Amino acid sequence: MTAPIIRNRDALREIVTGWKRDGASVGVVPTMGALHEGHLSLVEAAKARADRVIVTIFVNPKQFNNPDDLAAYPRTEHADAKLLVPFEVDALYVPDGDQIYPEGFATTVTVAGLSAPLCGYHRPGHFEGVATVVTKLLLQTGADLAFFGEKDFQQLQVIRRLATDLDIPTEIIGCPTIREPDGLALSSRNARLSAEARMIAPALHARMQAVAKALRQGIPATEATRQAAADLVAAGFDSVEYLELRAATDLSQIEHPEDQSRLFAAAWIGGVRLIDNIAV
Ligand code: AMP
């Protein structure tokens, strides 16, 4: 059976209040829909940890800095609901626009520092949009646990920070990136890749792994990443937006791997922007 679809904040609250009264823990998996195995892995993690699971679908206009990207973003609610059937989630929250941004809405959540580099630098306003909508979804669902993918590692760190800073009592749980067999990280945007671009796209992860190896051998990050970016363009990528080694906790840029560091990349191919990151 498909999960009940709830479009109204107060209706959701009533259901969650009932669950909590019965002593059940509540997990939430926030998404923008167009669900794939990456999202489903979060749902699986949520089912394993929480008594009740809510999946949210909301294509958040505030996090798109490019109107064409927003217009082209896939919307597949019916297929999404069907994909979730085997997981037996307890509710699908698909809020109407005014349930998130009612008339007169004027508040923005800004996470300084962590939002500044990488995707924050290249997509102005993106993390304000993400931080604002996630804050609202955590408060509206009242979830005890919330599940996010490491695929969007900077986003995960931004969300951890805002939950801590704003005393939101939801435990934020990061889950590993799910990939195609050829290494390409699953993403709703992959559907927009042409057949040719799709064949070249796995080079991003392959190059990142080669850079990680070079870094572990002591090659400085600026040197290793410069060559890899050139290789990606030679392989058919339009451009490499960033390819940088950073500390995993505060995202400061570093030249050599530390205790917890990650390599972050964003690159364009065939008009589609791909992002990825791996532990080094
Ligand atoms: P989105 O619908 O793109 O906003 O993603 C919703 C959630 O799914 C976010 O927490 C993402 O980090 C996560 N996610 C997206 N792609 C993947 C993936 N390939 N592996 C794991 N989690 C993912």
Image: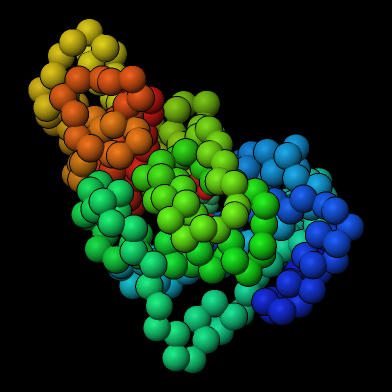
In the rendered view, how is the structure colored? rainbow
Locate residue 111: give its quadrant.
bottom left
Q: Is residue 21 left or right of residue 55?
A: right
Locate residue 69: give its quadrant.
bottom left
| Residue lying at 79% horizontally and 67% vertically, measured from the top left | 17
| Residue lying at 49% horizontally and 54% vertically, measured from the top left | 163
Label total for image: 0
Residue 157 in picture, x, y percent from top left? 41, 45
Q: Quadrant of the C terminus?
A: top left
Q: Considering only vertical position in the picture, is 261 above or below 268?
A: above
| Residue lying at 42% horizontally and 61% vertically, measured from the top left | 131
Residue 145 in picture, x, y percent from top left? 65, 48
Q: Is residue 239 left or right of residue 280?
A: left
Most distant residue in the bottom direction: 103
| Residue lying at 28% horizontally and 56% vertically, measured from the top left | 112
Q: In this orientation, does residue 190 appear?
A: no
Q: Is residue 51 left or right of residue 102?
A: right
Residue 42 in picture, x, y percent from top left? 63, 43
Q: In this orientation, does residue 181 appear?
A: yes
Looking at this view, is 170 or 204 the one in front? 170
Q: Considering only vertical position in the picture, is 10 above or below 212?
A: below
Q: Quadrant of the N terminus?
A: bottom right
Looking at this view, is 30 or 160 the one in front? 160
Q: Is residue 266 left or right of residue 279?
A: left
Locate residue 209: give its quadrant.
top left
Q: Considering only vertical position in the picture, is 117 above or below 21?
A: above
Q: Considering only vertical position in the picture, is 218 above or below 17?
A: above
Residue 6 in picture, x, y percent from top left? 74, 72
Most distant residue in the top direction: 217
Looking at this view, is 28 or 196 the one in front? 28
